[in-house]
Amino acid sequence: MINNDILRRLSTIFELTDEKVRTIFALSQCEISEAQLANYLKEKDDADYQEILDVEFASFLNGLIIDKRGPSDGPVRQTEEQLTNNMIFNKIKIALSLKAEEVISILELAELRLGKYELSAFFRNANNKHYRDCSDDVLSTFLKGLKIKFQ
């Protein structure tokens, strides 16, 4: 999925103001201007559209975890340079403190049925033989389920 689309959808789901989104970025030591954010939130066919880089979106997701759960003890977490759908899905799950059963029920709200074992394959280490790539469809369905749950 496109990072900008996910940012836009999360902002809508959690009713985040532009200032709140910028604050969430800042929680993970990523400062963005009002103009940058406005360009990130534009549709792809807009002339001012600016693609959000993986490292920037990882900062937002890490900031979302801090915003929803509070800062963690210990060293500051290194921001990922590259993101996969699996990583994005996992960060959102962590930020919302969701258990497997809750994720499954959110997916069911959007009419996708996954078993606990199928779901856990998305959150395994990429080197694990049971690891499975999270498709754009699954991530999009999860976001759709979140929208239903929170609105």
Image (cartoon, rainbow, N blue to C red):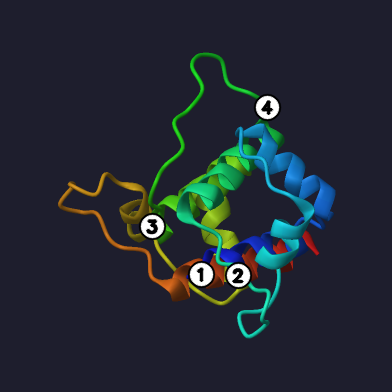
Dot 1 corresponds to which residue? 2
Q: CA distance from mark 3 to mark 4?
A: 24 Å
Dot 4 corresponds to which residue? 70
Residue 98 can be seen, yes or no: no
Q: Nearer the viewer, mark 3 or mark 4?
A: 3
Q: Nearer the viewer, mark 2 or mark 4?
A: 2
Q: Confirm or deny contact between disc 1 and disc 2 (CB under 8 A).
A: yes
Sooner in the amino-acid sequence: mark 2 or mark 4:
2
Q: State the image coordinates of residue 10 (x, y, percent, origin top left).
A: 68, 60
Q: Decide if residue 14 is on the left or right side of residue 120.
A: right
Q: Decide if residue 125 is on the left or right side of residue 46.
A: left
Q: CA distance from mark 3 to mark 2?
A: 14 Å
Q: Nearer the viewer, residue 130 or 3?
A: 3
Instruction: Give the answer, above or below, for where 92 lies relative to 109.
Output: above
Dot 2 corresponds to which residue? 5
Residue under the point 78% across and 54% down? 34
Residue 116, quarter of the rendered image: bottom left
Dot 3 corresponds to which residue? 84
Residue under the point 64% across and 61% down? 7
Q: Residue reaching furthest bottom?
A: 45
